[in-house]
Amino acid sequence: MKSKLSLDKLKHKYGLLYPNSEESLQELVNCIEMFQNNRSAAMLTRDKEGYQWLYDSNTVGMMMYVDLFADDVKGLMSKGEYLKELGITLIHLMPLMQSRQGENDGGYAVRNYRQVDEKLGDMEVFKKAVKYFHELGIRVCIDYVINHTSDDHEWALKAKEGDGFYQRYYYMYESDESPKAYEKTLIEVFPEVAPGNFTYVKECNRWVMTTFYPFQWDLNYGNPVVFNEMVKIMLYYAEIGIDLIRLDAIPYIWKALGTDCRNQPEAHLILSLFRDILELCAPATAILGEAIIAPDQIVTYFGDQKGKECHVLYNASYMVEIWNSLATRDARHLTHMTDYPIPDQSVWINYARCHDDIGWGLDEQKTRFLGFDPLQHKHFLIQFYQGNFEGSFATGELYEFNPKTMDARNSGTLASLAGLERALKNKDRYQLELALKRIYLIHALFILKKGIPMLYSGDEIGQTNDYTYHENDKIQHDSRWLHRPKMNWEIVKQDNASKNIAEMITQGVAELINIRKKLGQEGYIHHETVIHQRNNHVAIVELSMAPSLVKYQIFFNFSEHQQWVFTEDLRRYKLEGWLIEQIQGKRISLDKEKVLLGPYEVFVTKREI
Ligand code: OTU
């Protein structure tokens, strides 16, 4: 009964997106029913559990490129125990389906969505891997590049041959008239390396929309046939047991002339249809949307009362807050975090960096409120993380520097941006200690937070920037390769200073994951409250657990100097008596005037009962 009702709702929504498309609707309904009828017993059992694991405090993720982490899918399986020991319960794999020959944007130009790239293995091995990880208690997330295919995908090849049916899979035009009209309001995503949003295809003498690289052809979701094809692939992933599907570049999936072709209402409708279809067919599979845009816009992709959209989104705003607070040693931007309400049951992925650049999407109003000019502040951050600002501890590079606007984003690994690379290069032991403390602090900021913490593989051993991409002409124009080093498994086997450093970082990360799991024994993090106090270098957040009602206070010192917190300020939050620090077991008296925090120190405290 429930399922019938939802199917009717689905039909209605489909009709809003594709009026008068009876035939396509029928095809979709048939496909859903067939899927439901053929769902295996094993998957039905997983469906019963649904996606509850998303809310479990024990869920800790790590993202990685299969080849850079462990050569191939078999290699990935051989690292299962390593991941488990570290406490990882979710692996987030970067694109691993067959991608374009030659340049392919790190796999984001997919040639075949149903085949694993030959370099990594095949579908049979991958299915085994999914099963293996499930047995280990590790869930699997894969990337689904839905905005575009590569220019050598079979649909694109047929379009090139002149097949009109497949040309309608894309935004293809006979002349540059429409492209020019679109360009009037479009913005460039890769202004430096891939300017413009259209590419001339000589094979068929047509223009095709290519928002990203010229070899990434934007799919035309205005065509219901495309929508149905993409749903079938999503269901295919659900059937092989994928727990979380990352939908790439969701703000871009609907184009409308006269707009910037981002965040269109129809894009939301498409996602809400995807969500409904999964709830109907495969509730064990959830979707993670990738929308790295302004803070107030990101949250809209969780959906609203009209429809649920993504189960999970990247907390890109928080990521930027972390780096901002480190550069300024001022925690106010973070503690004054505007609370964009998110629907119940929505989950953030908290992280400090991913395979992409860091784009400075701070909330401009807040920056202004704190007394900074948003543009100048952004330029400060860009230079700071490039390592050019005087006194900067970071080593990084610019990404997509636009000389017209002087705008840029930044690239670099967590350790390099946090000062490790510079300290090692200068053989500066004092700076090295500070860098290690910063690395710990950064991990604490996203591990001890409501949502799913997502580590980037290699950061747990403090891998620094990889400059070898400068010599590779296929990728040298794309500085994101700076922070995608090959996992250095050798480092722990060596017997030198680097080994000690790597071990120290790993121990710190493991300690934080353990603390997170200890918190998990009290239930899940129900809500977070900022404890405002007068020292701007320090952020204090209180986590309220449910159902146990236990509260933890996390203190973060963003400065390399000692800092004091006035207990008088804490008393306003009913924090009195003694606090017990959970990592080292220190007892902190709140009867004294001040609480002392060491350089970059992190406290996780609980009231003594
Ligand atoms: C995503 O990123 C991927 O994460 C990138 O690795 C890809 O290159 C790209 O899509 C194309 O597939 O602009 O700078 O709001 O920020 O989709 C990265 C979303 C990007 C965009 C995002 C995109």
Image (cartoon, grey):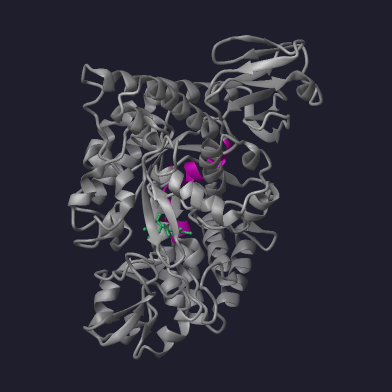
- Residue 496 percent location from the top left of the image: 23, 17
Most prominent secondary structure in the magenta stretch? helix
Please say whether residue 287 is visible from this viewpoint: no
The residue under the point 53% across, 45% down is: 320
Q: Quadrant of the C terminus?
A: top right
Q: Quadrant of ligand 1?
A: bottom left
Magenta residues? Answer: 35-55
Horizontal side of 516 relative to 565 (left or right) equals left
589 or 349, which is in the foreground?
A: 589
Residue lying furthest front: 390
Could you say which is closer to the camera, residue 473 or residue 169? 473
- Is residue 38 magenta-colored? yes
Where residue 546 appears, as percent x and y from the top left, is: 69, 29
* Residue closest to the eye, 148 or 182: 182
Q: In this picture, is 69 found above or below 516?
A: below
- Residue 580 position, x and y percent, is 65, 12
Please state which of residues 177 and 146 is positioned toward the viewer in this rendering.
Answer: 177
Q: Is residue 46 visible?
A: yes
Does the stretch in magenta take in 51? yes
Task: Using residue 12 as the reference point, say whether residue 118 is left or right of it.
Answer: left
Q: Toward which corner of the image does residue 516 lie, by quadrant?
A: top right
Question: Is 225 drawn above or below residue 66 in the view shown?
Answer: below
Q: Residue at x 24, y 55 (%)?
A: 476
Q: Residue at x 39, y 36 (%)?
A: 134
Q: Position of residue 451 (x, y in %)?
A: 57, 39
Vertical arrangement, residue 9 with respect to residue 554, above or below: below
